[in-house]
Amino acid sequence: MALRTEKAFCRICLGHCGMQLTIDEDDRIVDIRGDKDNPITRGYACFKGLQAEEAHHGASRLLHPLKRNAAGDFERISSEQALDEIAARLDTLIQQHGPDAVGVYFGNGSIFNSTAVTMQAHFLDALGSRSRFTSYTIDQSAKTLSFERLGGWAGGNLQLDQSDVVMLIGTNPLLSHGLLGFLASDPTKRLKEAKARGLKLIIIDPRKTETAHHADLLVQPMPGQDAAIIAGVIRLILDEGWEDKAFCARYVGAASMAELRLALEPFDEQSVEQRARLASGDLRKIAELFARDSTQGCAYTGTGPSMAPHSNLMQHMVDCLNVVCGRFTRPGDQVLSVDMMTPPREFRAEVIPPSRASWLAPPSRIRGSSSIAGEKPTATLADEILTPGPGQVKCLISCGGNLANLMPDQQKMARAFEALHLRISIDPYMSNSARLADYIIPPTMQYERADLPVSAYGFAFFPESWVAYSPALLNPPKDSDLIEEWYFFWALAKRLGKTIRFGETELDMRVPPTTDQLLAMRAQHPLAPLEEIKKTPSGKVFHDAGNIVLPPRPEATATFDVMPEDVAQELHELAAQASSVQGHESNGQQFTHLLSSRRMRNFYNTIGMHLPTTRKRNPYNPAYLNPEDMAAYGLENGNRIEIVSDHARITAIVEADAAVRTGVVSMAHAWGGLPGENVDLATHGASTNMLISTDRDVEPINAMPRMSAIPVNIVVIEKSATPSAITGILS
């Protein structure tokens, strides 16, 4: 058998791990492993990326487009015929209801497909539709809002190799690879290397995560208290005089610093530690290690606090902590992670002034929320479909996302799917969202298409200025009818008589471009044109990319707005909220526990759920409890419980986890069946999104729901042990 060895990079997550594939003469992957020649990931590859053989060639993969017939069943249809029919129906909807009637959701399954993520945005632009939704606005959109009202730093944050301390709040990058350019690539080895040279690591998380095992200081608060904790840390730093006084004088100003001090008055050590259920002295330990004993390094957040209550305030406080301590690059420093896809830009030691862009954008018709970086909040999608009136979404194209499972308020989302006039799912598998679609369009998968890394805001997602070209290594399976995701949007625009401008290039709408032509349009850095990138199969790090931080321009006088009026009001409201040691209140009801979100090592949200090898390891999502809580309820592993919120109740299988603090239920989201289905918990798991309401307990502007730190009660269905005393399990 003739075998060939090829190099590429994985596009499941931010890590972009270098991969080495062995491929047989039938274009089947027979071996895959990390590429030791890749200068960023250095041979590392996670379990998810190593399942490419099963993902591409497994029996569960869809190989032909499907159309729902009059009887409600799916039947095969050619891709071009499906495009003809979809375009005709879109044209009718647009004529009757306007372009906003056509919505696109772009999820994590496709977000690292650089041609597709660009094309779908330009497709909506060509239609004139504002109904753009992505996974970002239901993940960590608080970061955008904080940047817009605090301001940013034009020289960028410090990287791991430039830090003597790092604080991680509600993020577990050794599993998620989720810190942009920080611990996304080969994370465990990089963290160990940093620790060996003296890095101090602070972890704030209700669970002793895999990353927390490397911590010098681990603090395990109750979920949802991060804003108060960081407010208390900043107050302590200011009280002790550990702030970067020179940086604050130049880039914040005395008046704004005075407003910050005043707003933080209620967040003294004792009250913060009491409300967060911390041990006495924990807050001071954080402040001392981060600000007194260290001078370089930032605090970072992840999905945990970004999905919890007060997420916008939390992110402002964390970014404010970095400002107060001056944790930014300075003139002469090197920017280690430059985006080699976009034209060169200057990095300067100056403030990017607050823009308030999302506040200034016209409010949406759903709860007065706004657009975030040109996107509507995904948490409002169901209401955008269900609410009559101008702008109502009538057609939804879902690309790379299983909305039926991943959306909070799952029952409402199910009603929204039923209300749509046209449902299109671009999905390689029969996901729950695909099951609800009128048309299912299976795309080519990652090693069947060429690609370049994704990037944002001029900064790359890697620890260094790396770029690589990943060629199409496989032909689609024999006799299949698959299309690239970008082609779906281009072909629809062609049929609708629209012209797409891809970046700065107006596309020929008569003849489709090649993927390489589109990638060449993306490769805009003069040091890294596409043909140059192709010369190094494992990718190249550019050390001479003009990445030295320059002094500020004389006219650059902007300062950070550390305490705008709305942030001060949010802090005042947070301080006024009582925190009981005995339980948790939500909408007039009392609860004993908080449900906290978590990651599962072998999945990236719903990616991996259709692979038998992965599901054999993890057939369901357990409800993890601390062993003390298990004993208090008389529970043992495998017992079933009901988890009850103020919105709904679900049944789950319980499992002990000593890494979870008492009083917390730790559980992964996006599992289970469709609402109303009687699925087997042991093979499908439970949907935590059933417990969440999107009508209340949402953030202003970005409409972020309470998706973590959800007050719940535990109802025992079956137990195997005699309960111990429940008193005190929340301490």
Image (cartoon, helix red, strand yellow):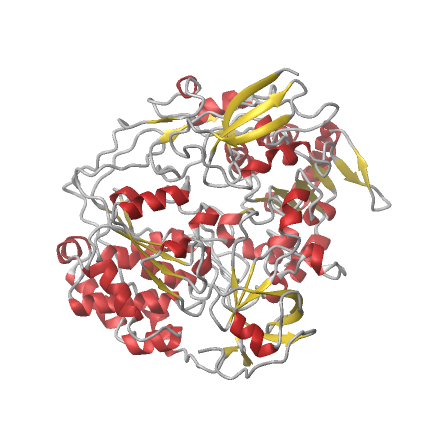
Query: Could you tell me which residue is drawn at 45 percent across and 45 percent down?
Result: 177
Residue in the foreground of this view, choosing between 529 and 19: 19
Left or right: residue 397 compared with residue 588? right
- Asked if 259 appears above or below 612 in the picture, the reply is below
Query: Could you tell me which residue is drawn at 26 percent across and 60 percent down?
Result: 562
x then y, percent, for residue 702: 47, 57
- Asked if 360 appears above or below 119 in the picture, the reply is below
Residue in the foreground of this view, choosing between 432 and 609: 609
Query: Could you tell me which residue is drawn at 69 percent across and 25 percent down?
Result: 477
Residue in the foreground of this view, choosing between 471 and 288: 288
Left or right: residue 577 compared with residue 477? left
Left or right: residue 141 compared with residue 609? left
x then y, percent, for residue 351: 24, 48
Residue 433 visible? The answer is yes
Q: Which of the 4 quarters of the picture holds residue 218?
A: bottom left
Residue in the foreground of this view, choosing between 486 and 454: 454
Q: Which of the 4 quarters of the picture holds residue 504?
A: top left
Which residue sits furthest front? Answer: 721
Which residue sits furthest top? Answer: 2
Left or right: residue 582 compared with residue 98? left
- Asked if 55 appears above or below 431 in the picture, the reply is above
Residue 673 visible? The answer is no
x then y, percent, for residue 456: 40, 39
Q: Which of the 4 quarters of the picture holds residue 283?
A: bottom left
